[in-house]
């Protein structure tokens, strides 16, 4: 595979640019808030239903819309003002979070209402994520691009794990409604940050959005690039398996270890710690050093650790397994996002990020729904080990294929 050449590499270099600094701070606060809400929704769904099926269904409602909308949203990002697309979607997300907070505080939430409001957030997130991920190329000067890609990938993936642990503490110490209120504030903060940044003019933005920025063109472009295609496939398989089970941790804590909210917080803490350690190590390496082979090997390790998590009878060993799983998954996530950013043509980046968003959001939705539905009949262990084995087989085949290409 080809890799972009990195001149001077310093992960913090991009923060010298005022507008990227505003974007980066606002983005990480927003993603923290969104992940706090995800965990609040997951715990509330479990409290209301005590059903793995409902837990999986509500997780699917959050992420499944991306399968249908993210590719279209990528076309919007390539053809229109990304900041306007982002702020419009965020307005809906803020109202949804506020509604959930008030319903929770007054005890009016039912599992059906929670499903409907989560579906609204899923639609909003599907429309905004491709614009968020591709906006970086319009903010950062070319000299800072490689550093910004590394820093953006790290902060995005770290927030996915730090946000849930904050939410777990808030739920345990205060109440679940606070997580929804905090999410609304975090998203509003990012919306304000977007209002005060400036972007560069994009010369290759299509003049005819319908003709030149169609969703099918993005799929054709990805299918013609082996590295992009393999990386997106790996993100999909780890999404179904590893990220799918992360949506089910309330059920894992109760059904496998009988630990309740304390076990849930412990599992999230171990996951967050593994991700932070991995992200810190990965940040020291240039994005171009991570190819599809290393991503595939990391995904293979993550899925192996997932199988151990499901099979071990010891909660303490489960904490070690989820640490290893998150460590490897973080490495794969950062490497995958950096590869997509650096190898995609600027005029097609929005559509590539749309497909990426469809996969990383749709994969966990499919995985959590399958695990939740199957667990209703056969328990948690069999479906978790099943998706882990499927993902491990795919990751191993990709690793073997790219290793043969190198030799």
Image (cartoon, rainbow, N blue to C red):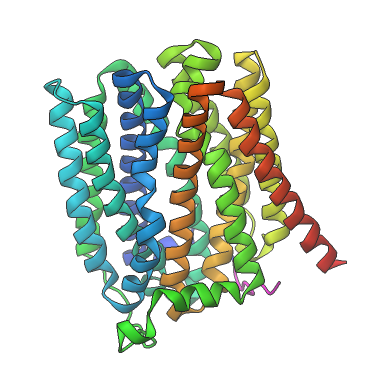
Write down the region rendered in magenta: 1-8
Tell me where residue 117 sits by quadrant.
top left
- Residue at point 70% right, 50% down? 395
- Residue at point 50% right, 75% down? 143
Decide which of 273, 181 is in the foreground and name it.
Answer: 181
Q: Is residue 144 above or below residue 245?
A: below
Dominant secondary structure (helix, strand or loop) of the stretch shown in magenta: loop
Decide which of 402, 332 is in the foreground and name it.
Answer: 402
Answer whether residue 392 is visible to the viewer in this image.
yes
Q: Is the C terminus in the top left, top right, bottom left or bottom right quadrant?
A: bottom right
Task: Check if residue 3 falls in the magenta segment.
Answer: yes
* Image position, residue 349 (x, y; %): 45, 73
Tell me where residue 318 sits by quadrant.
top right
Decide which of 203, 383 is in the foreground and name it.
Answer: 383
Q: Image check: 37 left or right of 184?
A: right
Q: Is the N terminus in the top left, top right, bottom left or bottom right quadrant?
A: bottom right
Answer whether residue 21 is visible to the viewer in this image.
no
Q: Is residue 211 above or below residue 390?
A: below
Q: Image check: 143 left or right of 19?
A: right
């Amino acid at each position: 595979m080809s890799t972009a050449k990195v001149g001077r590499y310093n992960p913090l270099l991009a923060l010298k640019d005022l507008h990227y600094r505003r974007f980066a701070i606002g983005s990480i606060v927003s993603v923290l808030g969104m992940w706090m809400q995800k965990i609040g929704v997951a715990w509330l769904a479990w409290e209301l239903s005590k059903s793995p099926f409902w837990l999986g269904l509500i997780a699917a409602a959050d992420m499944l819309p991306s399968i249908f909308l993210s590719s279209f949203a990528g076309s919007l990002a390539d053809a229109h003002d990304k900041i306007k697309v982002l702020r419009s979607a965020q307005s809906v997300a803020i109202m949804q979070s506020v509604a959930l907070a008030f319903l929770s505080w007054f005890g009016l939430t039912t599992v059906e209402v929670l499903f409907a409001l989560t579906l609204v957030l899923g639609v909003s997130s599907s429309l905004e994520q491709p614009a968020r991920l591709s906006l970086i190329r319009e903010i950062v000067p070319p000299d800072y691009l490689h550093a910004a890609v590394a820093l953006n990938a790290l902060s995005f993936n770290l927030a996915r794990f730090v946000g849930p642990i904050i939410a777990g503490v808030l739920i345990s110490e205060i109440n679940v409604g606070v997580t929804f209120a905090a999410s609304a504030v975090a998203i509003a903060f990012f919306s304000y940050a977007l209002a005060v940044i400036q972007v560069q003019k994009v010369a290759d933005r299509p003049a005819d959005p319908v003709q030149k920025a169609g969703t099918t063109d993005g799929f054709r472009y990805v299918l013609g690039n082996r590295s992009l295609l393999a990386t997106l496939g790996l993100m999909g398989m780890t999404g179904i398996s590893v990220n799918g089970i992360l949506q089910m941790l309330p059920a894992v804590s109760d059904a496998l270890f009988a630990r309740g909210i304390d076990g849930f917080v412990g599992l999230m803490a171990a996951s967050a710690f593994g991700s932070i350690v991995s992200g810190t190590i990965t940040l020291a390496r240039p994005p171009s050093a991570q190819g599809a082979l290393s991503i595939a090997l990391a995904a293979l390790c993550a899925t192996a650790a997932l199988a151990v998590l499901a099979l071990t009878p010891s909660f303490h060993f489960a904490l070690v397994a989820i640490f290893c799983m998150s460590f490897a998954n973080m490495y794969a996530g950062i490497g995958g996002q950096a590869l997509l950013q650096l190898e995609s043509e600027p005029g097609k980046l929005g559509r590539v990020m749309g497909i990426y968003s469809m996969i990383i959001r749709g994969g966990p939705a499919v995985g959590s729904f399958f695990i939740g539905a199957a667990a209703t009949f056969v328990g948690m262990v069999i479906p978790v080990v099943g998706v882990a084995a499927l993902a491990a087989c795919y990751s191993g085949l990709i690793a073997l294929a790219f290793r043969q290409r190198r030799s």
